[in-house]
Each structure stands twice: as structure tokens, then as C-alpha cells.
Image (cartoon, rainbow, N blue to C red):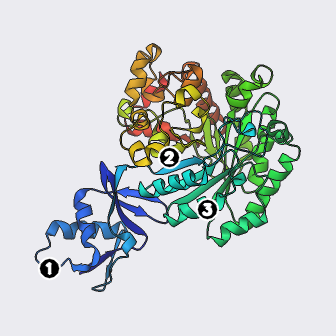
């Protein structure tokens, strides 16, 4: 009885997580127990598992692995591929990298985190960029999304893309303003067998040009969405809200759904970067309460229209018009052991690499020069060290308990095990210099009854709809926590 690991799986391991199967189609790591892994190492097409020296527990594990679809019976000697054989990386696991390959841009956006129109953070040399490509491969990072600035203005863009794919790193998304997305560009991706999602900014029907600082920007990005749809490239979008464009939310969502855009994430313009430097917040900015009121009003439009798009209204509300009987309250974090979870679950699995090559948790903190200066430059320290022992690892391994203990207002809060202090980037914006500070926007969602208003409104508009977080809390016997 011979077994082999199916071709799409590779045996991999990392420090503290040594036993995994990586799916080369979904680009996910399936972590297994040692007993299962021991059986997997024998499923190479050369070992007869029926031999008396093979333990019964190994045979039982093989049967379970077969049921899960990880292995298949084979003829003797049908060996696995070299690339499937076990490889262990000498660093902590990091699933994904989100990389600003340049700090330069061909737009003049009034809100840019990086002040990219002025090239504030420039871009790494070709040699340093390719060094990071090498480091990502050597550390077993599974996927990478590419952003900027505007990534397509970088002259060696295709060398970076080819370097990543040659190292087996899946390019999941390209974040772009859409100005340079054309048929010829899509041809180059198709020639390489790549179909990444193009995630493009769309800042309101009739208002996009104002924020982008370029006449004709809206026309260009509309064309980009249309040709991506026609050529079979998936698309996503991000929309910034400010006082003048907030009324376009419904039309903008429906437009994006009409051109086949799969997802949309909205957020009010944050008072950082170029927005802060230009002093726009006083005249054009929205407060948290104003933003929440806009979102709450839109929920009625959403259930009337049911746009075929996955919609994420900041940390307020999320739903998909194609699956209207489920919705999400992103501000609620559900975990079996809440205070022992990493303070930012996203950052623990996704590394942000700044235009300077710095290892950070996310793009919104990349323009906080004083704060980010403490964090390592990958081209100098090396990614292995960054993902083993560094200021970066210290930050992303910090537990929610540290955030809650750090803030007096969190200590006795009835919602502390649900919000866990909120978003670290927003907390840092609310309290400059303090990465453990509370996210005041999330605080208000709980304390001022916004979440209750959402559930009441959805219950009235779509009685069959169920909140995913409330369901999970109920399964854990914690549903009462949200009703306090």
C-alpha cells in the first residue's frame, strides 16, 4: 500500500510551527500534528505502509490524510516532486507581505499616507528591492500584494514580479490608481500566467478627480475596471469618504458592482500624510459620529439594492449582497482566549514593507516618522532576523492583555473582551506616539450604542439576516457580552 502527497501540496515548516502542508493552489498553509506529519513523510511513493514495521498509528493517520484529500494511493516508486519535499525555514511564520515597492506616484492625491506626489519616501534601489525579493523567498512567505505609491511607475516592476514568482510567491493583488492599467499591461500579466486582483481606488461618482488631483482620473479608472472585467481579471476597490462625496456612497457602490468589482472597502479620510499637511480636515473631514451616521443610513440602501459586491464599511458594518442573510460587525473580535490573542491579528499574518524597506504592521503608520524609525529596515537587518528577534516581532507578538492593561478606560469596560482596544493604527493616530493607546472610534461604536442600532436596523430590514460575530459568541456561550 503506497501513498504519495498530492502534487499541489508541499511539506514545509517554520520556527514554532514545524509541521505544515502548503497548498500551491490556494497558497495556504495547513498546519498538522506531529503524528500526521510523521505519516506524511512516509507518503513519498517509495514506502509500503502495509509492511509490518510500519505502526498501526501511521496507517491510521494515512487513512485520515487520504480522507482529507492530502494524499493518494499510487504505484510503487511514483515519487513526489523535489519541490514537495520537506523544507524548514529558520524564522517565524509569515503568510503574506504587503509591499510598497515605491513611494512615488503619478497622482497628486490630497490624502496620501506617503505624500507620494512629492516622492517623500522615494524608492529602494534595484539591488535592495531584489534583496527583499530574495528574503521573502528564503523566509517562506507564501503570497505578496504590491502597492506604492503607484507600483507601475517603478521601472523594474516586471523584474520584481518575475523574481517573486520564480521563488514561488503568489502575487495576490496589485494596488493601483488605475491610470496605467491598459490592455498592454494586462497582456504582460497574462503572458506570465498571472491574474492578480487589481485593487483600485474609486472615490465617488463625480468626485474622484478632486481627491486624486488629476483631471480625467475617474474616466481612467472606470476604463481600468471595465477592461479588467472584460479580460477576466478580478477587481477590488477602496473608497475614501469626506464631507462632499459622502452622498455618493450608494451610487458608487452600485457602479462598482455593475462593472464586476468583487469587493469595496470604505473609510473616512484620515488626518495624516498629505491631508494633514494640506489642512483639509477642518473643511472637508468627517467626524467618527458623522461617518457612522452615513454608514447607518446606507444600510437601508444596501438591503434595498443588494449590490453584488462584498462591502466593508470601515469597522462599522460588512456584508455581501450576494449572501444577504449574513452580515458582520468588524469591531467585534471573537476569540476563545481574547486577551491572549495578538493585539493585531492581521499584522501577525501579514507584514507591511514600506517604500523604505521597513518592516511595519500596516501602511497607515508608515508616515509616522518618529514611531516607525524604531523598526528595522529589511535590506539591512534581513527578513529572517526581522521575523525571529526584532522590534517588529516584539510588536506583533504583543497580546491584547497588554493593550487593555495599558489603558485605564479599558480596565473596567464591559466590552473589553470584544473590542480588545480596537485598531492599533487608529489608536496611534488618536494618541500620537503610543501604539498601545485605545482606538477611540471603536470605543464609540460600543459605548454610544452604534452596534445596537445596526443590529436593530438589519433586523427590521432583513429579518433573516444573522450577525456572524453574534453567532460565534453564542457558540462560545458569550452572547450576553454584546448585550451589556
Q: Position of residue 373 (x, y in %)?
A: 52, 31
Picture layout, residue 188 above or below residue 483? below
Give percent across and percent down for residue 278. Answer: 77, 25
* Most distant residue in the left direction: 52
- Mark 2 lies on residue: 379
In the image, which disc is placed on residue 97?
none
Q: CA distance from mark 2 to mark 1?
A: 51 Å
* Residue 238 left/right relative to 375: right
Residue 191 vs 221, above or below: the answer is below
**Distance (Cα) linking label 3 and label 2:** 17 Å
Which residue is depicted at the point 46% across and 53% down?
135
Which mark is drawn over residue 159? Answer: 3
Viewer-side residue, 437 vs 58: 437
Q: Earlier in the sequence, mark 2 or mark 1?
A: 1
Label 1 sits on a secondary structure element that is loop
Q: Residue at x 62, y 49 (%)?
A: 101
Q: Quadrant of residue 312?
A: top right
Amino acid at each position: 500500500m503506497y501513498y504519495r502527497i498530492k502534487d499541489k501540496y508541499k511539506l514545509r515548516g517554520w520556527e514554532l510551527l514545524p509541521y505544515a502542508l502548503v497548498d500551491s493552489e490556494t497558497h495556504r498553509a495547513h498546519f498538522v500534528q506531529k503524528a500526521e506529519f510523521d505519516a506524511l513523510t512516509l507518503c513519498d511513493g517509495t514506502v509500503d505502509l502495509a509492511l509490518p514495521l510500519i505502526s498501526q498509528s501511521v496507517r491510521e493517520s494515512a487513512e485520515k490524510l487520504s480522507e482529507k484529500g492530502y494524499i493518494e494511493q499510487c504505484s510503487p516508486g511514483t515519487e513526489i516532486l523535489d519541490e514537495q519535499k520537506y523544507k524548514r525555514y529558520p524564522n517565524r511564520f509569515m503568510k503574506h507581505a504587503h509591499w510598497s515597492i515605491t513611494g512615488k506616484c503619478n497622482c497628486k492625491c490630497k490624502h496620501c499616507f506617503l505624500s507620494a506626489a512629492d516622492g517623500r519616501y522615494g524608492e529602494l534601489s534595484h539591488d535592495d528591492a531584489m534583496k527583499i525579493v530574495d528574503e521573502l523567498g528564503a523566509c517562506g512567505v507564501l503570497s505578496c500584494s504590491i502597492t506604492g505609491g503607484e507600483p507601475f511607475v517603478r521601472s523594474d516592476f516586471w523584474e520584481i514580479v518575475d523574481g517573486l514568482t520564480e521563488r514561488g510567491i503568489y502575487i495576490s493583488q496589485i494596488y493601483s490608481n488605475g491610470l496605467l492599467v491598459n490592455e498592454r499591461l494586462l497582456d504582460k500579466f497574462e503572458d506570465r500566467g498571472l491574474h492578480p486582483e487589481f485593487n483600485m481606488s474609486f472615490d465617488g461618482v463625480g468626485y474622484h478627480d478632486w481627491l486624486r488631483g488629476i483631471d480625467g482620473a475617474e474616466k481612467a479608472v472606470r476604463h481600468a475596471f471595465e477592461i479588467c472585467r472584460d479580460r477576466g481579471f478580478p477587481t477590488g476597490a477602496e473608497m475614501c469618504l469626506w464631507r462632499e462625496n459622502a452622498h455618493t456612497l450608494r451610487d458608487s457602490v452600485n457602479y462598482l458592482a455593475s462593472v464586476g468589482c468583487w469587493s469595496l472597502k470604505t473609510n473616512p479620510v484620515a488626518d495624516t500624510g498629505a491631508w494633514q499637511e494640506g489642512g483639509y480636515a477642518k473643511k472637508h473631514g468627517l467626524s467618527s459620529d458623522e461617518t457612522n451616521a452615513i454608514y447607518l443610513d446606507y444600510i437601508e440602501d444596501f438591503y434595498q439594492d443588494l449590490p453584488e459586491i462584498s462591502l466593508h464599511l470601515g469597522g462599522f458594518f460588512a456584508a455581501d449582497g450576494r449572501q444577504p442573510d449574513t452580515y458582520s460587525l468588524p469591531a467585534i473580535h471573537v476569540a476563545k482566549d481574547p486577551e491572549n490573542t495578538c493585539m493585531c491579528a492581521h499584522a501577525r499574518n501579514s507584514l507591511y514593507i514600506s517604500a523604505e524597506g521597513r518592516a511595519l504592521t500596516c501602511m497607515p503608520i508608515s508616515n509616522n516618522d518618529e514611531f516607525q524609525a524604531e523598526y528595522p529596515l529589511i535590506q539591512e537587518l534581513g527578513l529572517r532576523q526581522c521575523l525571529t528577534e526584532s522590534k517588529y516581532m516584539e510588536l506583533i507578538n504583543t497580546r491584547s492583555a497588554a493593550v487593555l492593561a495599558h489603558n485605564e478606560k479599558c480596565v473596567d469596560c464591559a466590552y473589553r473582551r470584544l473590542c480588545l482596544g480596537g485598531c492599533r493604527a487608529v489608536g496611534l493616530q488618536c494618541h500620537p506616539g503610543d501604539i498601545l493607546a485605545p482606538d477611540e472610534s471603536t470605543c464609540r461604536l460600543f459605548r454610544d450604542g452604534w452596534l445596537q442600532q445596526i443590529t436593530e436596523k438589519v433586523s427590521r430590514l432583513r429579518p433573516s439576516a444573522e450577525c456572524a460575530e453574534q453567532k460565534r459568541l453564542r457558540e462560545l456561550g458569550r452572547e450576553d457580552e454584546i448585550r451589556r
